[in-house]
Image (tube, grey):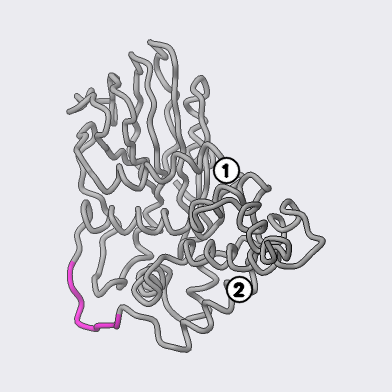
C-alpha cells in the first residue's frame, strides 16, 4: 500500500465506463483526484478489484444506481440507491462491486495523508480516519454543493485554474475531516484573517501570475501558514476565496488592455490567463454584466463623442 495508486486515482479498474478526472496540486502531503464516472447501459458487471492503498474513495450518486458490494470477502448491503447520497470506501480494504444499472457519479480520491495534513488547522486537531460504514450512503448537502461546482469544470477542464481546483479539494477534505473524522479542539488559537503583510504578499503574487497556474500551496508557503489556514483566512480578509480574487484581477487587467488600441479580444484573453476568447467572454459577462466587445465599444473614442 505504499505510494499513490494512479490506477485508483483515475478509476482504471472501471475501464468500461466513461471517466473524466481532474487532480489538485499538492495539498500539503498529497493530491486529491476528482472524477465523473458514468455508464449509459445496464449490467456493467463486476469491476476489477482496486489496488490496496492508504486512501479513501468518496462517491456522490448523480443518478439512482444499484450495485452489490463485497468488502474483505463479505457481502455488504448498500443503504440507499438514490441520487444525491454519498458514501465512503476505504482503499486499505479489499472490495469489489457488481454494477446492475446504468449510473452517473462523482468520485473523490482522498489520501489519508491529505486528511492528516489538516492537523492543527482551524484551531482543531483532526483525524485521518473516516468513520463511515462501507455501503452506507447518506444525505450530505456540502458534498452535493462542492460536487455541483466541479461538474462544469470536468466538462471544460481546459478552463479550470489551479487555484479553483485546489480550493475545492481543500474545502472537500476539511468537510470530510469535520463531519466523518474525529475532531478535537486544541489550545493554541490563531486569527482567521491574514496579517497586512500576508495580504500584500498574496495579492502581489496573484497579480504577478495572472496568466499562470498559481498553486494554493505557493500562496500559503509565501504567507508562512498551512494551505487550509490560508484558504480560510484569505476569504475572511478579502471577502472571496483566492481563485475568485484571481478571476476578478484577470478581468481588471483585461479592462486595462481593452482600452489600448491594437489588441484583439483573443490576444487579451490569452494574456490574462483565459483558455480562449469564449472562456474570457463568459467570465467577463458573468462578473461585469456585459460582453467584452460591448464594454469596449461603449468606451471607444467614437462612443464618447456620439
Residue 25 percent coordinates (x, y): 53, 57
Q: Are marks 1 and 2 in contact (CB under 8 Å)?
A: no
* Label 2 secondary element: helix
Span shown in magenta: 184-191
Q: In percent of the image, x 35 and y 48: which residue is there?
A: 146
112 sits left or right of 79 in the view:
right
In the displayed structure, 189 sits above or below 219; it is below
Residue under numbered circle 1:
157
Q: What type of secondary structure mainly makes up the magenta span?
A: loop
**Of 180 and 54, the residue lying toward us:** 180
Residue under numbered circle 2:
207
Q: In percent of the image, x 17 and y 28: which residue is there?
A: 79
Residue 240 percent coordinates (x, y): 40, 67
Q: Is residue 201 magenta?
A: no
The outermost residue toward the front is 306
Q: In percent of the image, x 35 and y 69: which residue is there?
A: 232
* Label 1 secondary element: helix
Sooner in the amino-acid sequence: mark 1 or mark 2 = 1
Amino acid at each position: 500500500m505504499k505510494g499513490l495508486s494512479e490506477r485508483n486515482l483515475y478509476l482504471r479498474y472501471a475501464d468500461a465506463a466513461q471517466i473524466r478526472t481532474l487532480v489538485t496540486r499538492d495539498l500539503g502531503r498529497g493530491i486529491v483526484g476528482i472524477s465523473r464516472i458514468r455508464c449509459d447501459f445496464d449490467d456493467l458487471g463486476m469491476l476489477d478489484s482496486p489496488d490496496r492503498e492508504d486512501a479513501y474513495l468518496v462517491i456522490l450518486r448523480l443518478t439512482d444506481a444499484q450495485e452489490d458490494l463485497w468488502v474483505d470477502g463479505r457481502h455488504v448491503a448498500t443503504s440507499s440507491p438514490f441520487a444525491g447520497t454519498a458514501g465512503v470506501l476505504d482503499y486499505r480494504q479489499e472490495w469489489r462491486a457488481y454494477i446492475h444499472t446504468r449510473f452517473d457519479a462523482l468520485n473523490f480520491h482522498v489520501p489519508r495523508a491529505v486528511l492528516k495534513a489538516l492537523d492543527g488547522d482551524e484551531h482543531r486537531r483532526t483525524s485521518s480516519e473516516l468513520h463511515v460504514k462501507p455501503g452506507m450512503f447518506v444525505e450530505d448537502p456540502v458534498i452535493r454543493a462542492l460536487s455541483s461546482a466541479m461538474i462544469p469544470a470536468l466538462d471544460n477542464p481546459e478552463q479550470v485554474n489551479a487555484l479553483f481546483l485546489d480550493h475545492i479539494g481543500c474545502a472537500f477534505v476539511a468537510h470530510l475531516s469535520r463531519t466523518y473524522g474525529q475532531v478535537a479542539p486544541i489550545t493554541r488559537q490563531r486569527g482567521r484573517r491574514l496579517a497586512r503583510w500576508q495580504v500584500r504578499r498574496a495579492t502581489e503574487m496573484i497579480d504577478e501570475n495572472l496568466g499562470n497556474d498559481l498553486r494554493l500551496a505557493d500562496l500559503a508557503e509565501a504567507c508562512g501558514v498551512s494551505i487550509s489556514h490560508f484558504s480560510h483566512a484569505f476569504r475572511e480578509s478579502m471577502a472571496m476565496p483566492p481563485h475568485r480574487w484571481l478571476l476578478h484581477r484577470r478581468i481588471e487587467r483585461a479592462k486595462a488592455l481593452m482600452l489600448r488600441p491594437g489588441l484583439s479580444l483573443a490576444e487579451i484573453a490569452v494574456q490574462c490567463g483565459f483558455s480562449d476568447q469564449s472562456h474570457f467572454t463568459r467570465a467577463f459577462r458573468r462578473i461585469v454584466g456585459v460582453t467584452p466587445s460591448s464594454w469596449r465599444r461603449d468606451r471607444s473614442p467614437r462612443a464618447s463623442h456620439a
